[in-house]
Image (cartoon, grey):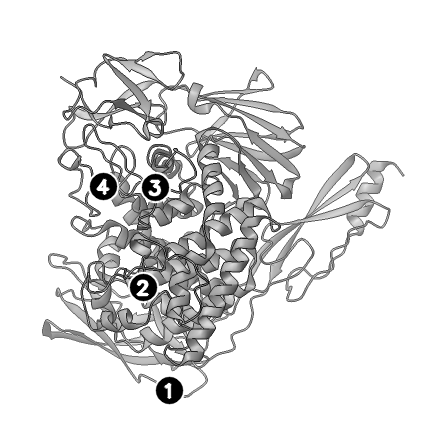
Amino acid sequence: MTTEEILLNDAKAIYIGNLNTVDADLELPCKGEYGSDITWKSSHPNLISEAGQVTRPRAGTGDREVILTALIQNGEDSLERSYKVTVLAKKPDWTAVYLIPMQIQTIQGQTDDIVLPGTVITKKNTGGCTALPVSWDPPCVKNVPGIYQVAYKPLAWTQPNLPTEVTVHIINSQDQDSAVSLTALLPASLPTSLTASRSQSNSPAPRLLQFTPDKVSIDGGIFAENKDRMLKYLLTVNDDSMLYNFRKAASLDTKGAKPLTGWDAPECLLKGHTTGHYLSALALAACCEGNESIYQKKLCYMVHELAECQNAMESSGNFQEGFLSGYSEEQFDSLEQYMTYPSIWAPYYTLHKIMAGLLDSYEYSGIKTALEIVEKIGMWVYKRLSACSDEQRRRMWSMYIAGEYGGMNEVMARLYRFSLKPEYILAARFFDNDLLIYPMSQKIDTLPGIHANQHIPQIVGLLELYSQTAESKYYTTAYNFWEIVTKSHTFSIGGIGEGELFQDADIVTKFLTDKTAESCASYNMLKLTSRLFGYTAASQMVDYYERTLYNHIVATHDQSGPTGGSTYFMPLKPGGKKEFDTDGNTCCHGTGLENHLKYNEMIYHRDISQNDHDILYINLFIPSTLDWTEKGIKIRQSDGYLEHGSVKINIEGTARFELRLRIPGWLEGKPNLFINGEEAVYTRQEGYAVIKREFCDSDAIVWSTPFIFRFEPSPDDPSIGSIACGPLLMMAESDGPGLLPIGGIVPEKTQHPLIFSCGEYTLKPNYMLWDNPYHAYVCNPI
């Protein structure tokens, strides 16, 4: 036989069973009957691995389709054969025993009838809750502003299945005469797929997937310089100092270590939060540098010692089972009594940092002990908050700073993703903050005056909750919040807030002070943006991410050496100068430990919604290397994009895929594409240039998006704004106290590609002015 005939016969001979109802592992052959080599690729390796291991979706989430592709090779020739596989979801192993009363709140001035939601929440006999479809008779309720309590009768039952009808009384606490009785028509038995029965109108499925940190390296420019400084700094950190407060709280030997200072000093009520960020930073470093690296060893030591602290706390009898922190449980007791800041200081915020650091240690570095620790903490959270009433929790979360809980809803939902214990997803819901969720779900801007970084992580958590529950209100709330913030509450650098608070919408010039743009807020907005982008593939989200990363986050790093210093506020007042927190251990010092190790998270995405071909997105043009293991290729972006507006992309290996290159929103004119020196044709789709072809080893792509200067006016005063060149805002180097009248002057080149003269002033990117005064906003005389 010819090689072609061998390949075809080997392809025909492959048999892997009935693929319509798969509920067990598959045997995937690695050798063809006629001698060809066979390798496998899975569209969803979490459901079917490339070795054939099957992980069935949990009960109620529906059956899933997976595309398995066999790459059949014989010598230098190859062909592919794809198989559509249906993986059956697990069967429900629970019965419903209790319908949880629902609350609907309306707002003054809203006159439309209340359309009742199409789900009810039921408790299960095995613990935890789930959603069931429901139809209402009548389907809506006449709206009288107030709070409606939805009560079910009967409330509980012992039958193995739900009753088909439940009488419901809807009572408005502010207008008793508007009470309505109606019937809820429930399914006679549990549906096989709860998710599929819900309305999906505002419930998008994940579309894009980030590559894991170990698959993307940062190779040059300011990004690599900052990353390398942070990696060096982590090696200087004394692990025992990071453990000091935990050992002290657990009555263990502190091993002669010095305590931390600032917000992590022994007398500070927030102590322990920096340790959580440190765990996350080590986990990111270890993931990129390898399991044998010093970062992995430091991380293993930290996790082992924290486990010792948790065990000592529990065995002492002075703490509830599972608790772990750098202090006792008293702050949590006080919060439940509504004690205000600064008598207490955000105890759940600190707990979130610890739990997030431990989960990162498990997810990125594979340390199972870290998951075991955080599972115990998660159960402590569930038990504590389940003992609180809904009203008590709502009041706690509404309290300024004291009730700040960071991303506790995120970390609990994320823990559920790893452990699948229903108590964790229920605990995540305990952090629902109606004061934020309801207006954002209605796209009503109620942000002015509230603490920015107290609420942004809550929205990130709602998106994680959505990924686990498919409840559209969580996605809608997160998406609306992102749009409201990015369109009406950001400075030109992408940063948010003045004095830590959201200010009035579309007002910028009143708030150009030395306390603008808290770094933590941008850290969390980038986290929210990257996760929303996975659902939307919207290029404008990358535009915001790029603006904030290049002009805020990169500029927060102390470039004097491996100090670990970060800016808390990014001054935007005329003549402002950055300060770097090197020993205060503020919140922004903590997020700063992670920021400069996360430059790789948004550069590349791959499409997971397509079954017929692979799509690779290049979103950011940062010198980097992508190891696309599934395709057997590497993609390298060269340094120099910020200097001349074009990037060279080299392909190592051969593969057929669709490449999408982002067309920046700031671009004026047409971007140019060259492949191997020749101008190439591309199509436009959703803000990306699309090229579909077989890319060959040593292919060289040049993507040119020419930079030109522009003046970006402020929304409240068009005569005041920022000077931009491509993705970079150009700051005027000066310590003068007033606005500089240079907005209408065309900058001139100097010998340095990123330094320009503008009248008597010099323009530089923000990160270059890390130790110099600058003007982010200037005046454009009209």
Q: Earlier in the sequence, mark 3 or mark 4?
A: 4
Check residue 157 in the rendering and tell me which mark sits there, or answer none: 1
**Horizontal relation, residue 685 to residue 141: left or right:** right
Amino acid carrying label 4: it is His
Q: Earlier in the sequence, mark 2 or mark 3?
A: 2
Callout 2 crowding tier (Cα within 10 Å): few <14, some 14–19, many ≥20: many
Q: Which residue is under mark 4? A: 489
**Which callout, 2 or 3, points to the residue nearer the camera?**
3
Residue 18 image position (x, y, % from top left)? 70, 62
CA gap between label 1 and label 2 equals 36 Å
CA gap between label 4 and label 1 equals 49 Å
Q: Which residue is under mark 2? A: 348
Q: Earlier in the sequence, mark 4 or mark 1?
A: 1
Residue at 57%, 30% in the rendered image:
636
Q: Residue furthest front?
A: 256
Q: Which residue is under mark 3? A: 566
CA gap between label 2 and label 3 equals 23 Å
Residue at 40%, 16% in the rendered image:
753
